[in-house]
Amino acid sequence: MGGISVYVLQSGSDLTAAFEAARQAAAAKVGWRPDSGTIATKQDVTAVRTDAMPIGPARLLAGQLLDRMDARYCDHYDVQAAAIPICDTYGGTVTAWLLFAMACD
């Protein structure tokens, strides 16, 4: 099996709740298969930043972390996903989370 980059923008200020909502939504579409290529294959999430940032720069950062094959986020067999808090302006109130990982496809 190969790996695929997964990015999900999930609304909400609470990371755990946002992660679980994203997993449930993905599983509702494709099931809980370990090779679904979705965030549903992940069982845990960690924030890579504590301060929120706009979606554009967050997407670039997530891509950079995956592109450099950072072992914390790039093992498509692992259960770990990563997240970046999203806001309208730097340092603003968290309104969503950009969840990302490598998943089996």
Image: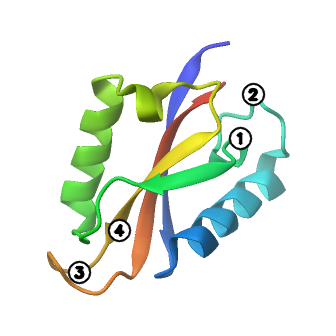
Residue of label 1: 41
Disc on res. 64: none
* Residue at mark 3: 88
- Side of 12 relative to 49 (left or right): right
Distance CA(mark 4)–CA(mark 2): 27 Å
What's under tag 1, amino acid-wise?
Thr
Q: Secondary structure at mark 3?
A: loop
- Foreground residue, 91 or 11? 91
Q: CA distance from mark 4 to mark 1?
A: 21 Å
* Precedes in sequence: disc 2 or disc 1: 2
Q: At 21% from the left edge and 84% from the top edge, which residue is drawn?
A: 92
Earlier along the polypeptide chain: callout 1 or callout 3? 1
Residue at 29% from the left image edge and 87% from the top image edge = 93
Disc 2 and disc 1 in contact, CB within 8 angstroms: yes
Q: Residues within 10 Å of mark 1 (few under 14, many from 20)?
A: many
Q: CA gap, disc 2 to disc 1?
A: 8 Å
